[in-house]
Every structure is written in C-alpha cells, then in structure tokens.
Amino acid sequence: MQLTKTEEDLMNYLWKLEKAFMKDLLEAYPEPKPANTTVATLLKRMTDKGFIAYNLYGKSREYYPLVKKKDYFSKHVNGLIKNFFNDSSSQFASFFTKETNLSKEELQELRAIIDTEIKNK
C-alpha cells in the first residue's frame, strides 16, 4: 500500500518529529497551513492504511509512525527499478548518473559508496 503525495508530506513531518499531536503537525507545515479537518482526514487514512498509530491521552491523540522512513523509500526505489528499469539496477544507475547532471565530485562520491559496499559483501 502506498501513501498519496499529501499523506507523504504529512508522514515526513511525523518522521521528523517522531511523535506528535495534531497541533504539532499543523505547526510543522509552512504557510498557508492546511485546515484541521484536512490533517485529521489524512491522519485517519494513514492510520487505516497501517502507516501510523496513536496513543490516547484523554481526548488527544499522539501519533507515531509504524513504518520507518528508510524502509518506505527503499520499497519505492526497488519498485521503481523493477517497474521502470526492467528490474535492472545497472539500467537504473546508468539513467541516474546520466540524466541527473551530477558533478564529477558527486560521481566520485557515488563511486566511493559503491566501492565500500563491494568491500562489505
């Protein structure tokens, strides 16, 4: 199951805060802030989808993520590679390095990361 773009935006605030009441999440948004009802609806949908949960304190709910940011985005990248690059990480890497206009320094940093991963295998 996936999050919509607006749910993903809210989830990013929750990942950053780790735990938050609705007022904390509203404060995290830049101006113009969304309506309380909009955020409440998003929180309900995200709870129903199993991405977040909450603890009740009286009538207040403190929300927290059930899914780690790294796990969520890792699944997205793997899906992207599978669906758009024929499940080929080398096709993805070729596209990424050619089409994103990376500088020589950024490419060298990528090489260093890959070299480190190769040594660790």
Image: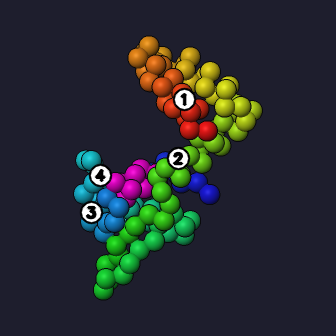
Position of 98 compared to 56: left or right? right
CB atoms at circles 2 and 4 under 8 Å apart? no
Q: Which of marks 1 and 4 is nearer the N terminus?
A: 4
| Numbered disc in front, either 3 or 1 | 1
| Numbered disc in front, either 3 or 2 | 2
* Residue kind at label 4, given as amino acid type: Tyr
Give the label on residue 114, or none. Answer: 1
Name the residue beneath numbered marker 2: 73
In three-dimensional space, the C-alpha distance between marks 2 and 4, rounded to whole angstroms, equals 21 Å
In the picture, the quarter occupied by the C terminus is: top right
- The magenta-colored residue range is 7-16
The residue positioned farthest toward the right in the image shown: 86
* Element type where label 3 sits in the image: helix
Q: Earlier in the sequence, mark 3 or mark 2?
A: 3
Residue at figure coordinates x 53%, y 52% from the top left: 71
CB atoms at circles 3 and 2 under 8 Å apart? no
In three-dimensional space, the C-alpha distance between marks 3 and 4, rounded to whole angstroms, equals 9 Å
Give the label on residue 24, or none. Answer: 3
Residue at figure coordinates x 40%, y 67% from the top left: 64
* Residue kind at label 2, given as amino acid type: Phe
Task: Check disc 4: other Cα within 10 Å, few if <14, some if 14-19, many if 20+.
Answer: few
